[in-house]
Amino acid sequence: MAVAENQSLGGGSIVKLDHEAKGESLWLDSWKRLRRNRAALFGAVVIILNIVIAIFAPVIAPKPYDLQVLADNNAAPMWVTKIFPTMVPRGEEGGYITISDQYLLGADGLGRDLFSRIIYGGQVSLMVAFIGPLFAMVVGMSVGLAAGYSKGWVDNLLMRFVDIMYAFPTLLLVILLMAFFRFGVGSLEPGTLGYSINQFDRGTGGLLFVFIGIGITSWMNMARLVRGQVLSVREKEYIEAARSLGTGTRGIVFRHILPNILGPIIVAETLAIPTYISYEAFLSFIGLGVNPPRPSWGGMISEGARGIASYPNQAIFPALALFLMMFAFNFLGDGLRDALDPRMRGVD
């Protein structure tokens, strides 16, 4: 705490501090508010934990995700049968579940370890969680900055293109793109560009077309948000001062406008990540996502849903993993929205 010394001067007083008082930046103040938000911290911890697990999946997973032990198909440990009373172990009246403690959460219909597949399935969801915002940042911010700062015919042209893209239902557009790329391009002659792209998609387990489908539709909201933010700050006093000092367009956009609109952009993209994850899960659920045997939470839910009455663990456990991941990003996004709100500065 600073110690103040009062000195009288001409009927007034001067307050002299024993050390220089330092101001607090908006980002530091935002970080302090974010740390006090327990829900946001919980979300951040869950996300970081999932990232670590996804990176070290080959070490953490007890079995390869594609290892099939047909003799153990639909097996489950005893504790799972206690949670789901409809799963009756063999040896009891009406029993049909093979009890095996080799599988922490049980095995699927092909004898593959559910726990290992859930761990590897997190890799797909996390990649989508970061690829979607990357496309949105690169494309959406570029379009929004150009439209908002240029105005005039450039603004009209770019925004009309965004409106045309909005005219298509997002999920339907992604499904059509995936169906075209996955089945139409694959029928081309070997050696052509389309054939090469399809082969590359197969080599990545079907992730390429998932990223293309999500990337093409993830930037439109970002473009509109950035344009609106640019229009709100481009006439501010500090922008006029920068122009009067001879700062060029690039310097104004990247040194003055962009840093002052990053807060809403970060919040919007964090809150949009669960939507990207749900797109991938839905695509995998209907068979247009990653290619088997690569696991995806949506694909695992789809496979488990076919026998959910008899083997509920095969659908519910990957659904819980998906639920937890999406809620973690929602909690973090809500916390960032409150922390980065300049009106909350200095408020506990």
Image (cartoon, rainbow, N blue to C red):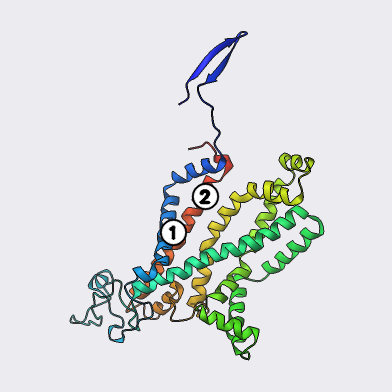
Q: What quarter of the picture does the N terminus occupy?
A: top left
Residue 72 horizontal/vertical position (percent): 28, 83
Q: Residue furthest bottom?
A: 189
Return the mark for residue 254.
none
Residue indicated by mark 2: 336
Label 1 element class: helix
Q: Which is more N-terminal, label 1 or label 2?
A: 1
Residue 14 horizontal/vertical position (percent): 58, 16
Q: Quadrant of residue 67?
A: bottom left
Amino acid carrying mark 2 in the image: Leu
Amino acid carrying mark 1 in the image: Ile
Residue indicated by mark 1: 47
Q: For the residue carrying disc 1, how many other residues have a C-alpha within 10 Å: few (<14), some (14-19), or many (20+)?
A: many
Contact check, label 2 and label 1, Cβ < 8 Å: no
Taking the image as shown, residue 86 lies to the left or right of residue 152, namely: left
Q: Quadrant of residue 84?
A: bottom left
Along the viewing direction, whichever of 155 and 62 lies nearer the viewer = 62
